[in-house]
Amino acid sequence: MGDRPSYAEQRDLLCRFFLDTHVAYDVADIQWPDLQPGTQQFLAGLPIWDEAVNTEHETAVLVRAMADHEPDPVLAEAIAMQAFEEERHATLVTALTGRYGIEVRRRPTPVVGDPVWAFLKSGWGETLDSFVAFGVFALARDLALVPQELLAVFDLVMQEEARHILFFESWRVLCRTARGGWPATRFAAAEGRTASLVVLARLRLAASSPGRTSADNQNFLVSGIGALGDVTPRAFVDRCLAENDRRFAPYDSRLARPRIVPALARALRKALPDRPVGSVAVDPQATTSFS
C-alpha cells in the first residue's frame, strides 16, 4: 500500500504524457489532394460520414464541458487540450466532407447536464469506436484504397484517438483509486451505467438492417467491413486487436490500457462468421491514383 503512487504523482504522469505528446497542426494548412472520380465515389460511398461528423462535434462539446467543470487546474489543462483536439477533429472531418462533396446530416448540438457523466459517455464511445476505426484504417492502408496524402492525415487522427483513450482510461483509474474526496462508489456506479448504455447502443447499430437507404443506414460497422473487400468479421476483429496493441505500444506502460473492449472482442470473436460479409467492386487503378 505504501508503494502506491499518490494522487499528485498519478495525475502528473497522466497530464505530462498527454500534453507532451500533443502535435501542433492547423486544419487550414492541410492540402487535400484532388481525387480521381473512382476514388471520390468510393470515399463518398463509405457509410460512416454522418456518424463521424456528428460524433466528433458532439464529443468536442462534451469534453469542453468537462474541461470547464474540472476544479483541479492541472487536470483541467490536459482535458482542455483534449477538447481542443476534439474540436480540431470535428473541423477536419467537416473540411474533408465539404472538400469532396459528401453530404452529411447534422444532429442538434447536445446540451450538457452533468459534465462528468457526459465525459464518461464520450470516453466510452470513443474507446469502442476507435477500436473499430483502427482496424478499418489498417485495412484501407493495406489495400491502398485512398491516396497516401489522406492516409497520412488520418493516421495522425487515429494516433490522437489512441492518446485520448489512454487519457480516459488512466483518468478513470485516478478517479476511482487516488482522488481525495471523490465519491468513489458513485463514480463506479456512473461508470458501469454509462459503459452499459454505450455498449448497448453500439450493438444496436451493428445489428441494424443494412438494407436501409444511405441517409438512414447506421449499420456502418457491417457495411464498412464489406466496403473494404473480402474480409471476414473474425479476421477483422483480429486486425482490430493487433492495431489496438500497436497504437498504444509507444506510450508509458504505467498508463492504463483499455481492457473491456478488447476482452469483449476476444469473447465474441469465436462466434463471428469466418466468411466475408460482402464486398464492393473496387477498381485498383481508380482508387490508388489521383489527379
Image (cartoon, rainbow, N blue to C red):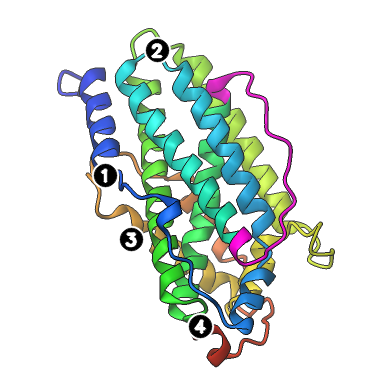
Q: Quadrant of the N terminus?
A: top left
The residues tagged by marks 1 and 4 sit, at their Cα atoms, a distance apart of 32 Å
Rendering quarter of residue 73:
top left
SS state under label 4: loop
Query: SS of the residue at dot 1?
Result: loop
On screen, residue 73 above or below 123: above
- Neighbourhood count class around disc 3 (C-alpha, 10 Å): few under 14, some 14–19, many 20 upward: few
Residue 104: within the magenta?
yes
For label 4, the residue is: 290
Tell me the kind of residue under disc 3. Answer: Arg
The residue that disc 3 covers is 246
Quadrant of the image occupied by residue 2: top left
Res. 71 mark: 2
In the image as oriented, which residue stretches furthest toward the top?
A: 181
Q: Where is residue 132 in the image (x, y as percent from the top left)?
A: 53, 59
Q: How far apart are the two marked residues, 2 and 4, measured between alpha carbons?
A: 49 Å
Query: Residue 39: x and y, percent?
Result: 59, 80
Give yes or no for contact between labels 4 and 3 (Cβ–Cβ under 8 Å). no
Q: Circle 2 sits in a helix, a strand or a loop, which is it?
A: loop
Q: Does label 4 or label 3 sit earlier along the sequence?
A: 3
Q: Name which residue lies at 41% across and 75% down.
A: 148
Q: Using the image, tell me which numbered label, if any, was put on residue 21.
A: 1
Q: Earlier in the sequence, mark 2 or mark 3?
A: 2
Indicate the amino acid at tag 4: Phe
Query: Marks 3 and 1: CB-CB under 8 Å?
Result: no
Report the span colored magenta: 98-117
Q: Nearer the viewer, mark 2 or mark 3?
A: 2
